[in-house]
Image (spheres, rainbow, N blue to C red):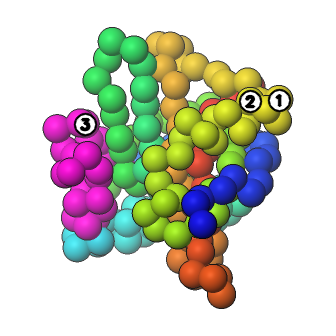
Amino acid sequence: MMAEMIKAYRQSVGDVRFIGKRYGDSDRVDGMFAARWDEWWANGWFEAIEKQAGASPNDTFEDSDAYIGLMRDKPGEPFQYWIGMFVPIHTDVPEGFAYIDFPKSAFGICWVYGKEPDIYMKEAQCWEKLREEGFEGVLDADGACWFFERYGCPRFTAPDEKGNVILDIGFFVK
């Protein structure tokens, strides 16, 4: 079975800070950022962010405790891929990390259901699904599009009886 888009919905969030590390196309291995994720696990970098965010990072908004692959795309500029987490807006940034503050926003979220690796690289299909559902994209002040992979627990971490998981793909929307 190929991956399928099984749910699309709007999620409203207040002001949030994204803390993580930024990567570019030169950081890919075999076209992917999996090796960068391996570095995160090996170095305990998510734990450093969670410690700064406090005991309940999920209090920011539903699924804000998930690990994020945040992407920035703007024609004529280098592609950015960030790994990290959304945290409360005033969270201190641990040494060695960078951050981006986002104002009150709405996300268009699409759930991609299937097996790894079939669930990856489905951003274009998710965007089409969200557009079909009436969502409109929003660009930042510099004209860039921001979107993300959200690895939520237990949707992504606990396969169902068929061995499938759910990867959230989100876009900033109006």
Residue 97 visible somewhere in the drawing: no
Q: Are circles 1 and 2 on residues that touch, CB within 8 Å?
A: yes
Tell me the magenta residue range: 20-40
Q: Amino acid at mark 2?
A: Arg
Percent x, y of residue 7:
77, 54
Q: Residue at x 52, y 69 (%)?
A: 115
Percent x, y of residue 39:
22, 64
Label 2 sits on residue: 131
Label 3 sits on residue: 24
Left or right, residue 36 beside residue 16? left
**Secondary structure under the numbered disc 2 in the rendered image:** helix
The part of the image, by quadrant, that contains residue 81 is top left
Magenta region includes residue 31: yes
Percent x, y of residue 118:
49, 60
From the image, which quarter does the N terminus lie in? bottom right
Q: Residue at x 63, y 42 (%)?
A: 126
Q: Earlier in the sequence, mark 3 or mark 2?
A: 3
